[in-house]
Amino acid sequence: MSELLRLEALNAYYGKSHILHDVSLTVGKGEIVALLGLNGAGKTTTMRCILGLMRLRSGAVAYEGKDITGWPAYRVARLGIGYVPEGRRMFRDLTTLENLQLAENGRPGEWSIARVIEQLPKLGELRSRKAGRLSGGEQEMLSIGRALATNPTLLLVDEPSQGLAPMIVEDVYRILAEMKARGVSILLVEQNALLALKFADRAYVMDGGRIVYAGDAHSLREDTDRIRTLMGLTDVPA
């Protein structure tokens, strides 16, 4: 599998606090990679560094073999990196359709707004409703649709199951699986380790801003003792 994204020894700080410690990982074309860890482990910070939303102290970010370290966020987005942020973060006073229209960036590809609505028909039903009046599950669908409207080759998805009912979570992950089937690579941050590992090809686990595990997702999912140790969990089923 050819490589799409590579992070090499990222170090990042908030003020004087050293948050990321030599973080390295890769995402291949057409795969889902899970990035797991407890709250505060550095997962979202890693995504922010990829997106150009946070400055690196050292290290490198490469996309399709091109060094994009230090690029501003708008240039990173135009490369084809879409973002589904934790907490959805949409324009609450704009309609569903207006949120999708704002996401269009002129990149060529199959994901016109009409195609997004075809794949996520619920958004068509809600096109005239303000985003602030959508349910949590509907907002997550809109957040994914908004990212798809940028015609990404890579999606960064941050905590998609957070606060959602199990049935809605199933819908969200079905959509992510369909995106993978269409050739979109996904870097997935998720607190629900077993759920993420069910869909992922490979996995990394972070602790204290460091990568402490890298390997096959299926093998990790089958090793419940290791999941307990790496994730600090006590309720992983045997």
Image: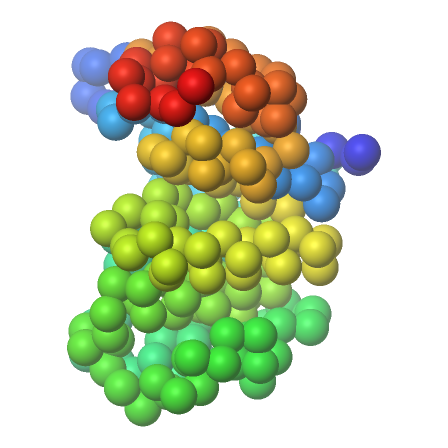
Q: Residue at x 70, y 55 (%)?
A: 181
Horizontal and vertical percent position of residue 65: 73, 34
Judge whether residue 39 can be spotted in this image: yes
Vertical order, 225 against 131 (above or below): above
Q: How is the image coloured?
A: rainbow
Q: Which of the 4 image quadrants contains residue 89?
A: bottom left
Give left or right: position of 1 versus 119. right
Give left or right: position of 211 versus 129. right
Vertical order, 108 against 10 (above or below): below
Vertical order, 149 against 221 (above or below): below
Pick the quarter of the image with the N terminus.
top right
Q: Nearer the viewer, residue 166 or 11?
A: 166
Horizontal and vertical percent position of residue 100: 43, 76
Horizontal and vertical percent position of residue 137: 32, 64
Q: Residue at x 70, y 35 (%)?
A: 28
Horizontal and vertical percent position of residue 78: 57, 57
Judge whether residue 4 can be spotted in this image: no
Farthest right residue in view: 1
